Image (tube, rainbow, N blue to C red):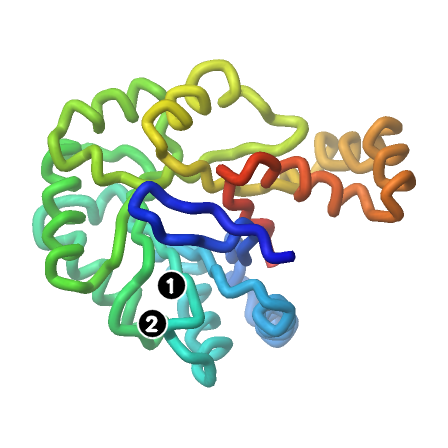
Amino acid sequence: MKHTVTLRNGVQVPALGLGTWFLGENKSARERELESLRAGVAAGMTLIDTAEMYGNGKAESLIKEVISDKKRDDLFLVSKVLPNNGGKHRLERALDDSMKRMGVEYLDLYLYHWRGNYPLEETVAELERVKKAGKIREWGVSNFDIDDMEELWMIPEGRNCLVNQVLYHTGSRGIEYSLLPWMRKHDVALMSYCPLAQAGTLRRGILNNPVLKEIAQKHNATVEQIMLAWNIRGGHTIAIPRS
């Protein structure tokens, strides 16, 4: 059974996708990264999330190689624009560069990576402009807290935002207090990055958590599988573990 999330515009999106954070940064890991991405796509993970920041565009170039033999309509491609490219005309140039690196003529979803110095109204206007031009199907934001979302909603076209991509996993649940309820109320889908937690002490602690290990054993699964299943429960969250 393939889990999906229905966005406010009615489009169904895979609930599980491939993240590419930190990919493209190490030449020696290139073949392994390509292999991982290809394995994910072959397993049915047709949503791929990337950003112009990842590997200074090299992650997007990796994706071009992986999807070159795939039907474009079978994929759901997401990239992000850096805050310093969020202004008038700069955003479109950044988008064009991202699409060129990925070898595509449009993106399914384009995200404003985090708040920058450009007025939010200007960035929204640019996102709407490239959408009307057919270069992106929809747009959203990333790393926006509740104050940012409320400010966005005060902009008439700001309510066209469909997704907010933020940190969310079993060991980081702060968004459940105010941001997530606000997003549910306004039908903004959650895209969770690092759903398996980042490396380090926190991740080790979660993977060795006795409760999670017990649940995993009960369901003949790994702790990572349980973490992902927990993350996408309810049908409102898109999880993008790094490939």
Look at label 2 and name its amino acid: Arg
What quarter of the picture does the C terminus occupy?
bottom right
Placement of the N terminus among the 4 image quadrants: bottom right
Q: Look at 61% across and 73% down and name the residue there.
A: 42
Residue 213 figure quarter: top right
Distance (Cα) linking label 2 and label 1:
7 Å
Assign a secondary structure to mark 1.
Answer: helix
Which quadrant would residue 180 be assigned to in this image? top left
Residue 135 percent coordinates (x, y): 20, 63
Near mark 1 (Cα within 10 A), the count class, few <14, some 14-19 or many ≥20, is some
Q: Which mark is residue 4?
A: none
Image-based side of 106 in relation to 72, left or right: left
In the image, residue 95 above or below residue 87? below
Q: Which comes before the other along the chain, label 2 or label 1? A: 1
Judging by the rendered image, the residue that carries numbered circle 2 is 101
Q: Position of residue 28 (x, y in %)?
A: 62, 71
* Residue 57: assigned label: 1
Q: Is residue 36 visible?
A: no
Q: Where is residue 124 in the image (x, y as percent from the top left)?
A: 16, 40
Question: Nearest the camera: 79 or 46?
Answer: 46
Q: Residue at x 42, y 46 (%)?
A: 6
- Is 124 placed above or below 174 here? below
The amino acid pointed to by label 1 is Gly
Residue 86 picture location, percent across and down: 19, 45
Badge 2 crowding class, 10 Å Cα cut-off, few under 14, some 14 to 19, many 20 or more, is some
* Residue 202 appears anywhere in the view: yes
Label 2 secondary element:
helix
Q: Which of 49 and 56 is in front in this view?
A: 49
Q: Please tell me whether mark 2 or mark 1 is closer to you in this view.
A: 2
**230 relative to 46, above or below:** above
Q: Quadrant of residue 202?
A: top right
